[in-house]
Amino acid sequence: MEIINRRQRMSSVARKLRREQDQTIGLVPTMGALHEGHLSLVREARRMCDVVVVSVFVNPAQFGPGEDFERYPRDLTQDTTKLSDYNVEYIFAPSVEEIYPKGFSTYVTVEGLSNQLEGVARPGHFRGVATVLTILFNTVRPDFAFFGQKDAQQTMVVKRLVRDLALDTEIVVLPTVREESGLALSSRNAYLDGRERRAASVLYRALMYAREAHDDGERSARRLAEVVRTQVEVEPRAQLEYVSIADAETMERLDKLPDDRPTLIAIAVRIGRTRLIDNIVIQPARQKTRATVEA
Ligand code: AMP
């Protein structure tokens, strides 16, 4: 395994792999502090590609003022140890100056999709995400790039980015990895103390209540949002920032859940000082019914 810090070295290594050795490259972009969620992406990249590159870069452009950029957990040594179990060939761990050298002034904005949910709560967040991913994709030119459903809106932004800018990378999205309590793994869980961590299972529980209500026939987005809100309010340490019920492909807000398209229920909740997000996708009732009948 080689740790590469320079953009130029990364692109020349990747170029050689592609051109001279005809290898397929998989990229797993991360901000480090790796956990099983990240490693599930690495495993799939390992399965699908000849060469795996994991990028570790805490991207200042996607943090807003007053957010946790400074205190975000960083431990490249431990990340390297974890990745060595998967025979990852390259870790790309550039410095901030390497990605944003003096005079940097070009940003990528995915319009529309970036102005909802996380984009409202964190203005400029997706501009930072789209910009760094464009740089990473142009540096590595991966055949495949791997993302987690945990960041549902990010997966949509990156798919749109790749499509609109004709980037030659296929986006692979993998399911959210959770603790037994239902809490989605996240590097930010490290901020939680024991009691907060237990409280944080309320995110998934609230989403499950909404799924149950949908299974019982509820189709009103407002009432499903109310189910989520009520559940989150049961937990005194939790404060709901938003619950969004939207079309899972377009992110358009819904009044009524359709029976022919998947719906995304996404939430952001503060547990003490820590802001956590989670989501589930509700499959259309019509498809579910058909699957049940077939089964
Ligand atoms: P991050 O380091 O938080 O920027 O995450 C890097 C990638 O790992 C993103 O594509 C995330 O969606 C993905 N990821 C983070 N947490 C999880 C999880 N619990 N399950 C699956 N993927 C995850």
Image (cartoon, rainbow, N blue to C red):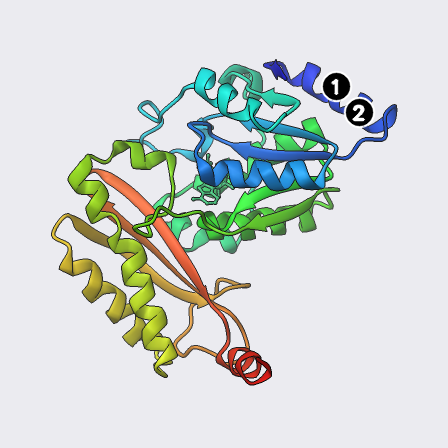
**On the rendered structure, is 247 left or right of 219?**
right
Which quarter of the image is occupied by the C terminus?
bottom right
Viewport quadrant of the N terminus: top right
Residue appearing at x 64%, y 34% in the figure: 27
Residue 129 x %, y %: 51, 38
Is 124 situated left or right of 182 in this image? right
- Residue 201 at what x, y percent from top left? 26, 51
Q: Mark 2 — residue?
A: 17
**Circle 2: element type:** helix
Residue that mark 1 sits on: 13
As shown in the figure, which amino acid type bears the numbered disc 2?
A: Leu
Q: Are marks 2 and 1 in contact (CB under 8 Å)?
A: yes
Residue 202 vs 145, above or below: the answer is: below
Q: Amino acid at mark 1?
A: Val
Q: For mark 1, give the secondary structure.
A: helix
State whether label 1 is within 8 Å of ligand 1: no
Side (left or right) of 199 relative to 288: left
